[in-house]
Image (cartoon, rainbow, N blue to C red):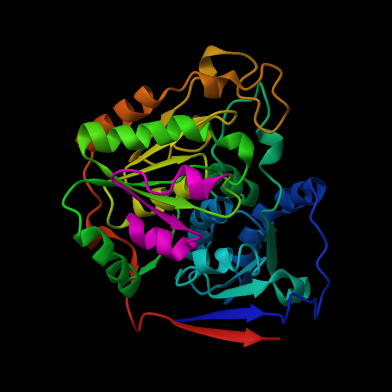
């Protein structure tokens, strides 16, 4: 099998200039998508394009839809149109080696005329994520927008065996249980007070001898001083999505907010404790049987406030204590098993050739 990366040089539009997609465009796509899917059943080798330009977690949550399309049209050519420069190519790295994706195309060189069906998944979720509305998982919203009923909701991510082996040397030096910790989400409102989380990480080592690998990035405030040199922990700064996924293969638990790591852990089926504030956990973790959520929004109104300004000062975060986090992590580690290396979605050499074309 072959996967092709079609990129432009320096992010400059070559064929068709990229125009931001609007929610109204997404609604127009929704009304015609199911009809077009049925029509394409008659085509021998339909060319289908999925568009999603940002968010590692969001791209992962579209992969069950991509998988369902490939099951429906076994001979189809599926192209994923995205922002290939987002976070140093993080979206390409997320989709790379996915056997459902035949081609990854930079959105600036994408031409609608080249495809039988174009599915715009840029905006269909925000209208459902508002105070007072029932929580719906984005995995389901993406599929519903296309008109497909999913049988398998698990996101798809494929590791390389050499990536997993490269991270093994870190964990081979430790005999204790380990957890991978992400202190923050890309959106600050989905991140709790780092001092509370830090206290939980320290207590996990002092009381239960659980080591932590803390992954931080440049946008993380005071990360160098707050997370460096913690007892029983190591800080890894600016690791990309492929290295983080490889480290997940070795840990007993992932501790994170409502972030991309939650969905990456869901794809790899790694036990996860996720901490929620203004977003609803029922719209995120319900398809991940190995994940549990810490959330106090059900105790207050108008929580969840989602992306709107919170009128009560985001008190949902303030109710979460380090003791609660520690108890949730210890209990979940006792009730779940470390991921089985033999069940990981691993891309084997020779299964797929990846070719890069600069247009």
Residue 258 or residue 192, whichever sits in front: 192
| Quarter in which the N terminus is drawn | bottom left
Q: Which corner quadrant holds the C terminus?
A: bottom right
- Residue 316 placed where, x, y %? 55, 21
- Above or below, 150 against 46 in this view is above
Q: Nearer the viewer, residue 243 or 135?
A: 243
**Can the viewer see residue 242 in this picture?**
yes
Which span of residues is magenta-colored? Answer: 222-248
Q: Residue at x 80, y 76 (%)?
A: 13
x then y, percent, for residue 50: 64, 63
- Indicate the position of residue 10 as horizontal and vertical percent values: 73, 78
**Is 108 left or right of 263, judged from the image as shown?**
right
> Is the residue 285 above or below the residue 295 in the image?
below
Taking the spot 53% from the left edge, 20% from the top edge, the residue there is: 318
Instruction: Tell me residue 79's x, y (percent).
Output: 61, 71
Q: Quadrant of residue 278?
A: top right
Which residue: 34% across, 59% down? 247
């Amino acid at each position: 099998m072959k996967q092709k990366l079609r990129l432009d040089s320096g992010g400059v539009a070559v064929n068709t200039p990229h125009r931001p997609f609007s929610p109204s465009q997404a609604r127009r796509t929704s009304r015609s998508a199911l009809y077009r899917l049925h029509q394409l059943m008659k085509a021998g080798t339909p060319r289908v394009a999925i568009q999603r330009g940002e968010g590692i977690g969001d791209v992962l949550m579209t992969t069950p839809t991509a998988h369902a399309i490939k099951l429906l049209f076994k001979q189809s050519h599926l192209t994923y149109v995205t922002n290939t420069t987002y976070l140093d190519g993080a979206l390409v790295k997320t989709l790379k080696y996915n056997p459902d994706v035949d081609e990854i195309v930079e959105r600036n060189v994408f031409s609608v005329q080249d495809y039988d069906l174009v599915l715009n998944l840029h905006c269909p979720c925000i209208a459902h994520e508002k105070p007072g509305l029932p929580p719906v998982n984005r995995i389901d919203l993406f599929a519903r927008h296309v008109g497909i009923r999913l049988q398998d909701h698990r996101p798809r991510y494929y590791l390389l065996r050499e990536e997993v082996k490269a991270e093994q040397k870190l964990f081979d030096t430790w005999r204790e249980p380990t957890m991978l910790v992400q202190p923050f989400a890309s959106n600050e409102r989905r991140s709790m007070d780092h001092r509370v989380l830090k206290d939980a990480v320290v207590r996990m080592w002092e009381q239960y001898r659980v080591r932590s690998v803390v992954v931080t990035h440049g946008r993380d405030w005071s990360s160098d001083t707050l997370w460096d040199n913690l007892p029983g922990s190591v800080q890894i700064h600016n690791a990309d999505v492929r290295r983080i996924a490889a480290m997940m293969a070795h840990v007993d638990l992932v501790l994170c907010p409502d972030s991309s790591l939650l969905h990456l852990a869901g794809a790899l089926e790694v036990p996860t404790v996720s901490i929620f504030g203004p977003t609803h956990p029922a719209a995120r973790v319900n398809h991940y049987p190995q994940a549990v959520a810490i959330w106090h929004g059900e105790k207050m109104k108008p929580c969840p406030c989602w992306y709107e300004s919170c009128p009560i000062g985001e008190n949902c975060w303030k109710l979460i204590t380090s003791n609660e986090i520690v108890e949730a992590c210890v209990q979940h580690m006792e009730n779940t098993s470390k991921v089985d290396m033999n069940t990981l979605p691993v891309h084997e050499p020779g299964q797929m050739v990846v070719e890069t074309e600069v247009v």
